[in-house]
Image (cartoon, helix red, strand yellow):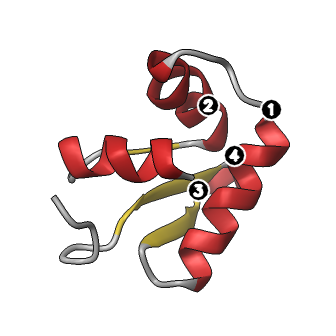
Amino acid sequence: MAEILRYLAMHPEAGDTPQNIAQWWISFERFLPKLSDVEEALAYLVVEGIVSKTVLLGGERFYKAVPGRIQT
């Protein structure tokens, strides 16, 4: 979860799918995480009101920071 928050602090307008967050946001940090761990972290961040979730046509989930909720 820290990697997601760190990425969003540096790129507050960023948004993406869980798969791309794992591959491009977090793997940049050093490792490729398990998708289930990324989804769990995103679900927590949604509940806390830090990240919003949108379901796109076809069911794809898209996450991005809620404006003003990420500390830089």
Label 4 neighbour load within 10 Å: few <14, some 14-19, many 20+: some
Quadrant in the picture for residue 72? bottom left
Residue occupying the point 55% across, 70% down = 45
Q: Mark 2 and mark 3 in contact (Cβ < 8 Å)? A: no
Q: Is residue 7 above or below residue 20?
A: below
Q: Which mark sits nearer the N-terminus, 3 or 2?
A: 2
Q: Is residue 44 above or below residue 41?
A: below
The one of 58 and 44 positioned closer to us in this rendering: 44
Question: Separation of disc 2 and disc 4 at Cα?
Answer: 6 Å
Q: Which mark sits nearer the N-terminus, 2 or 1?
A: 2
Q: Mark 4 and mark 1 in contact (Cβ < 8 Å)? A: yes
Q: Which mark sits nearer the N-terminus, 4 or 3?
A: 4
Residue occupying the point 46% across, 83% down = 49
- Asked whether the viewer can see residue 11, the reply is no
Q: Mark 1 and mark 2 in contact (Cβ < 8 Å)? A: yes
The one of 23 and 9 positioned closer to us in this rendering: 9
Badge 1 is on which residue? 34
Residue type (three-letter) at the residue carrying disc 4:
Val
Question: Separation of disc 3 and disc 1 at Cα?
Answer: 22 Å
Where is residue 36 drawn, in percent x and y? 84, 45
